[in-house]
Amino acid sequence: MSRAEMTALGWDACDVVLVTGDAYVDHPSFGMAIIGRLLEAQGFRVGIIAQPDWQSAEPFKALGKPLVMFGVTAGNMDSMVNRYTADRRLRHDDAYTPGGEGGRRPDRCTLVYAQRCREAYRDVPIVLGGIEASLRRVAHYDYWSDKVRRSVLADAKADILLYGNAERAVVEAAHRLAAGSSPADLADLRGAALFRRVPEHYAVLRADDLDSADEAAGRCSGEAVIRLPSLAQVETDREAYARASRVLHRESNPGNARALVQRHGDRDLWLSPPPVPLTTEEMDAVYELPYARAPHPAYDGAKIPAWDMIKFSVTIMRGCFGGCTFCSITEHEGRIIQSRSEGSILREIESIRDRTAGFTGVISDIGGPTANMYRMACKDSEIQRACRKPSCVFPDICDNLDTSHEALIGLYRKVRKVKGVRKVMVASGVRYDLAVESPDYIRELVAHHVGGYLKIAPEHTERGPLNKMRKPGIAAYDRFKAMFDAAAKEAGKQYYLIPYFIAAHPGTSDEDMMNLALWLKKNRYRADQVQTFLPSPMATATAMFHTGINPLHAVRHGASEPVETATGLRQRRLHKAFLRYHDPENWPILREALTAMGRADLIGSGPDQLVPAFQPPGTGKAAAMPRPARGPGRTQRFTTRGLSTDR
């Protein structure tokens, strides 16, 4: 991280300099640490510039001119998600910064850093990566500016973007660039985006013709590329945007996905097919690189909240085949599960025990994007390669999916036997519709790996929004709860489920939120922390939010399915208020809404009523929220669909 360290190592220059928006924590939960150690293992001299001052190019020269490339990432989170709430309010803290201090990275971190790298050393190739670049690799709706932005590759003026888990691609890119190749020669890498012409021998399958019913679904012999609706189209035509989203997500299986191309002005943005998932042996190798497993000494022991959260946790797998439309895991990590071996996991736990300061015998989490998809896969590899379904569990669990939890149960039992380990917690989200397939797993989980309560995410109770989320019905949650409670009783434990719900997700009406609030009251749940849908870049639900069209079904002129969406700030706040029906601050806005909905019968103090008619003194500030002006000559509805908001 400094010239002094380079001198101590005997380096006169770095081959690769990685620039990141996170503090440098040398641990495999931090992307820049994985890439840095991976390139080091390949013989490259790697420097890291963490959270540089972006006001000038000088901090980007701190380690000198890299001989091979700059690698630029915003860090473990999209910088806009990291800095702003779902209501576009500024966050004042940052879990990935020493002291939790906010404001240490710029908005749209990736493009700012890349531009500064270009100013620092104009002729050094710039490679973008990480989740921010991955989710902004094509023209995308940006919630914070409320407009469609072009690919971050264009704005950043970088040479190439590597999306998804890019270990293979970044190693090959570094070797080829070091051997004298130009970034333009790297178009054959899996998981790459760059500007290039479509080769003449490629067949072009068109998805940009919205009057066509096939959405470029046709097959052809030889090499082919699908032309998505152009930047100009998706900026002005919401159906074009929805179709681009639909086709992009359909081309996500590494076994059959085709290259995509999208016109940006006078250039073509080329996206090669997604990366091939890592094998178990490759996953083990990545996670067993010689990490220091600690923040860099330059931070002098300063508290880094994200590090404190994960330092005693273990990642056992990547990917998710749930296909939830609001989630970015599939877009980034893919839907094919990549699992580590038992031996590798056990060795990491021993390393935590022996090397991580403050370890008291408790592994805080053993999981990944989900807790219980370890080693799950399609029963037939040929079917998996041919499948184009976006989810293996919606609307029902696929008959071809092996849902056995035996490997995970066996792993849990071996982990508990590691000397010096007193308790192993499962804090990753449990996919309950899979868990109910294995009563033995639920008993194992409850008896040994839950501490007081378990967080679970049914997300909603109503079929309308659940269909738009690709989530199972509330009956699956009820079945899991019954099995969880029975297992807790059998184990002599008093444990509780904490359900999570989303407000204002596309496809959710005011009535849906009212019914969810009634369900919460009936079941005596009072949510203290609630989540309002945040339209993250490239998610399917974000396409619904922006376009008002459902890309889960065919998209073309005159045949697209509309989606009811809460886009106005006031209606989004109302939906959030329904989740916190018990908070007196929300009672005025809820009473007004219930009256407008013709459900004033729910106002009162009865057990089946939602909010009382009285207001405690000094409460109800939500009632003073700014409201849209009434249109002339007619009564204003309470909801604000389609109205401008105070953004």
Image (cartoon, helix red, strand yellow):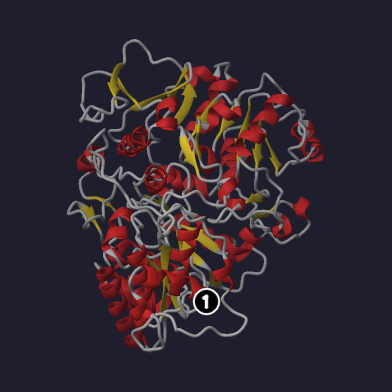
Residue that label 1 marks: 422
Helix, strand or loop at mark 1: loop
Tell me which residue sits at (36%, 45%) in the image: 548
Q: Is residue 96 above or below residue 202?
A: below
- Residue 137 seen anywhere in this rendered image of the structure: yes
Q: Is residue 567 above or below residue 503?
A: above
Which residue is situated farthest in the left direction here?
399
Residue 280, percent from left and from top: 39, 47
Residue 241, percent from left and from top: 38, 35
- Side of 180 where 57 appears, left or right: right
Q: Is residue 270 above or below residue 19?
A: above
- Residue 271 seen anywhere in this rendered image of the structure: no
Quadrant of the frame with the N terminus: top right
Residue 160, percent from left and from top: 53, 26
Tell me which residue sits at (37%, 13%) in the image: 199
- Side of 164 where 518 appears, left or right: left
Q: Amino acid at mark 1?
A: Arg
- Side of 626 where 612 appears, left or right: left
